[in-house]
Image (cartoon, rainbow, N blue to C red):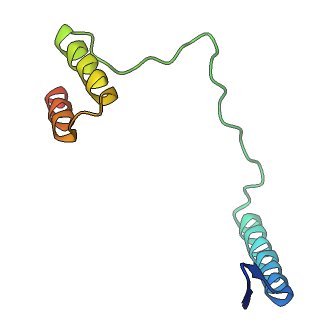
């Protein structure tokens, strides 16, 4: 493939298109071999159920999280933020 000023030549485009078509044919043949033509949709989320954060509700954890948030907004030292995160994981 040859480049010309940040764009592809006509031959390069034709070659890439041919390669893409070949990849599509290979994928379709693999799909026919596995017999998986029926794709299932992902389950829809229940709109009434709100996702909850996996945060423990004790006071110490909430205070450290608030402190982390404040320090993060103030562009505090990363070592300090990592130390507070380490405390949360303990």
List x then y, in percent, for residue 29: 77, 72
Give the quarter of the figure containing the C terminus.
Answer: top left
Which image quarter: residue 79? Answer: top left
Q: Is residue 64 above or below residue 39?
A: above
Q: Is residue 68 left or right of residue 11?
A: left
List x then y, in percent, for residue 31: 73, 64
- Residue nearest the viewer, comparing 19 with 1: 1
Q: Is residue 3 above or below residue 81?
A: below
Q: Residue at x 82, y 78 (%)?
A: 17
Give the quarter of the figure containing the N terminus.
Answer: bottom right
Q: Is residue 55 left or right of residue 46?
A: left
List x then y, in percent, for residue 35: 74, 60
Q: Residue at x 26, y 20 (%)?
A: 65
Q: Is residue 50 left or right of residue 23?
A: left
Q: Residue at x 21, y 9 (%)?
A: 58
| Count of marks overlaid on the render | 0
List x then y, in percent, for residue 32: 77, 66
Q: Is residue 78 above or below residue 64?
A: below
């Amino acid at each position: 493939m040859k480049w010309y000023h940040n764009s592809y030549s006509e031959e390069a485009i034709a070659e890439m298109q041919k390669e893409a078509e070949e990849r599509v044919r290979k994928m379709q043949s693999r799909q026919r071999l596995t017999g998986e033509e029926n794709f299932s949709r992902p389950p829809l989320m229940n709109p009434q159920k709100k996702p909850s954060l996996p945060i423990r509700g004790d006071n110490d954890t909430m205070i450290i999280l608030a402190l982390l948030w404040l320090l993060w907004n103030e562009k505090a030292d990363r070592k300090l933020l990592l130390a507070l995160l380490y405390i949360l994981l303990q």
